[in-house]
Image (tube, helix red, strand yellow):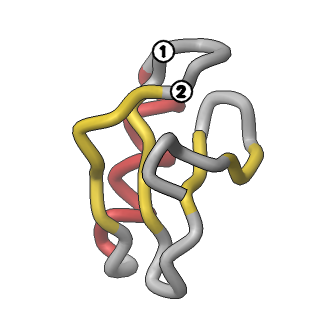
Amino acid sequence: MGDLHRQIGERLSEGWAMLSQHCPQCSTVLLRSRDQQIFCVSCQCYCLTEEQ
């Protein structure tokens, strides 16, 4: 879990945003990149949300 927190922290410091939505596969909080793509750091993949 520590590595996951580190990865989230790194992306937040790079300007990514933490969302109130969670990954449908693993329930990890989703992040939005600076170019508006939604990413799960646990699954290491971009995904779509219901709004998209």
Q: Is residue 34 above or below residue 39?
A: below
Q: Residue at x 41, y 27 (%)?
A: 22
Residue 20 higher or lower than 22, as above or below: below
Dot 2 and dot 1 residues touching (CB under 8 Å): yes
Which amino acid does the dot numbered 1 rest on?
Answer: Ser
Give residue 28's position: percent from left, percent from top.
46, 23
Query: Which of the 4 quarters of the picture holds residue 20?
Result: top left
Q: Which residue is mark 2?
A: 23
**Direction front: furthest residue:** 51
Residue drawn at (28%, 52%) of the image:
18
Q: Is residue 16 above or below residue 10?
A: below
Q: Could you tell me residue 36's position as x and y percent?
A: 49, 77
Q: Residue furthest left?
A: 20
Q: Give whichever of 28, 10 is nearer the camera.
A: 28
Q: Nearer the viewer, residue 36 or 7?
A: 36
Judging from the image, what secondary structure is the residue with disc 2 in? loop
- At a point 50% along the width and 31% down the height, the residue shown is 4
The quarter of the image holding the C terminus is: bottom right
Provide the residue designation for mark 1. Answer: 27
> Residue 21's spot in the image, x, y percent?
34, 34
The amino acid on which the numbered mark 2 sits, given as a three-letter code, is: Cys
